[in-house]
Image (cartoon, rainbow, N blue to C red):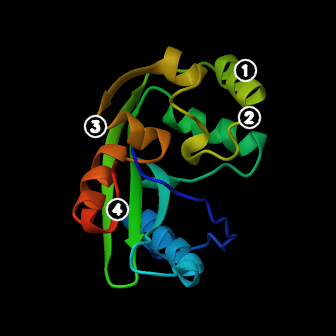
Amino acid sequence: MGFDFSVVHQDIDERYPSDLAVDKIAPFLAHEKAKAVAGFLNDETEIILACDTTVICEGISYEKPRDREDAIRILSALSGKTHYVMTAVRLLGLEWNAEFSEKTYVTFQPISFDEICYYVDTFKPYDKAGAYAIQEWIGLNKISKIEGSYYNVVGLPTHRLYEEILKFKHNFDLG
């Protein structure tokens, strides 16, 4: 995207209040992630980018699967249906902050149990919201339609992020 960056990894507790609406889960976790690294800001030219992604189908939020059985359960629930991927982004600087969310609708063709097991056993999508990555086998062979940003489904809505960062371009050197 043309920006210099470094990664600061912090483990956070990714639990959220049980009564939180599904559309509020990703923004809540993005906010928690930003708070966890806010102390690393040193000057007004730095920005923290924190995000979280969830997959929502029929009013149920699907985050990262706990294990093989959970991944199979999630993919079985998504099979033959349209769901949406929601990524919430939190930008934090010393003197400003911004937040936004992006939704992309994804339609899966029906996926057989054998195909689900093949995908889970081969690609081990345990660190993926919704138990899949669009850029892998399942995206190539079982996604029939997307409405919205492909990169949002990958995990970061880069087109929107770029526009938001440009609002603060006086802090960055794009050249």
In percent of width and height, residue 83 lies at 39, 40
Whether residue 171 sits left or right of residue 133 in the image: it is left
Q: Which mark is residue 66?
A: none
Which quadrant is the N terminus positioned in?
A: top left
Q: Position of residue 9 (x, y in %)?
A: 67, 65
Q: Amino acid at mark 1?
A: Tyr
User: Mark 3 and mark 4 in contact (Cβ < 8 Å)?
Assistant: no
> Which residue is tagged 3?
148
Whole-number angstrom distance, CA of label 1 to CA of label 2: 10 Å
Answer whether residue 21 is visible to the viewer in this image. no
Q: How far is the residue under mark 4 from the one under mark 3? A: 28 Å
SS at mark 3 in the image? loop
**Mark 1 / mark 4, whichever is N-terminal:** 1
Residue type at mark 4? Answer: Phe
Q: Earlier in the sequence, mark 1 or mark 3?
A: 1
Upstream in the sequence, badge 1 or badge 2?
A: 1
What residue would you read off at disc 1? 118
